[in-house]
Amino acid sequence: MLQGILMLAEQLLAGESRVEILYSRVVRPEGNPRAREILAQVFTPCDPAWRGVGVIPGSGLAIREEYGAFDAEKMLTVEVEPVREHPGCSCGEILKGKMAPSDCALFGKVCTPENPVGACMVSSEGSCAAAYKYGE
Ligand code: SF4
């Protein structure tokens, strides 16, 4: 908190306004070696399907076979239906930076925060929800 206040005061005195982060005080470029070691011990890379984007090889983590007793997917017999995307939803293109939310034909008409069609409009931090609330 104090460091944040100091940084704001320094910007104020310099007549500047910009976003700064303090992560460098607590996070090293190589991360936390012990935590990474444990993650690698318990998880293995997998190829998940990301909503609106599709499968990205190696972008997910799955529980290793030897820890299968703790894997909820193996313990619970719940059938999870594949996510059905609305054919007119352009979340994937928006998430990839290829389209702006207002480029979507459904934006603000059929798709609103009160009646979201796609994932980008569901939560308040979604790109379409933010663009709807604050403009682009
Ligand atoms: S406005 Fe709605 S339908 Fe269009 S991309 Fe965003 S979330 Fe999908």
Image (spheres, helix red, strand yellow):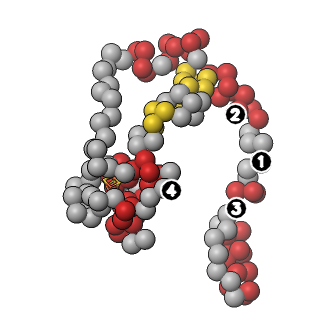
Left of 55 or right of it: where is 7? right
Q: Is residue 61 above or below residue 96?
A: above
Which is in the foreground here, disc 2 or disc 4?
4
Residue shown at 59%/30% (left/top)?
A: 58
Q: Is residue 124 above or below residue 60?
A: below
Which is in the foreground here, disc 1 or disc 2?
1
Kindly identify the amino acid type of the residue bearing the numbered disc 1: Pro
Kindly identify the amino acid type of the residue bearing the numbered disc 4: Gly
Q: Nearer the viewer, residue 25 or 111?
A: 111
Identify the secondary structure beneath mark 4.
Answer: loop
What whole-number distance in Å separates the C-alpha atoms at marks 4 and 1? 26 Å
Residue 5 image point, x, y percent: 66, 74
Q: Pointer 4: what residue?
A: 97
- Asked whether mark 2 lies closer than 8 Å to ligand 1, one says no
Please tell me which of labels 4 and 1 falls first in the chain. 1
Q: Pointer 2: what residue?
A: 35
Circle 1 crowding by C-alpha within 10 Å: few under 14, some 14–19, many from 20: few
What whole-number distance in Å separates the C-alpha atoms at marks 1 and 2? 14 Å
What whole-number distance in Å separates the C-alpha atoms at marks 3 and 4? 27 Å
User: Answer yes or no: do the residues labelled 3 and 4 have beta carbons within 8 Å?
Assistant: no
Residue shown at 43%/71% (left/top)?
A: 136
The answer to whether any part of residue 34 appears in the image is: yes
Tell me the quadrant of ligand 1.
Answer: bottom left
Query: Which mark identifies residue 22?
Result: 3
Which is in the foreground here, disc 3 or disc 1?
1
Residue shown at 57%/34% (left/top)?
A: 59
Please tell me which of labels 2 and 4 falls first in the chain. 2
Query: Which mark identifies residue 29?
Result: 1
Please tell me which of labels 1 and 2 falls first in the chain. 1
Q: Quadrant of residue 46?
A: top right
Residue 102 image point, x, y percent: 36, 65
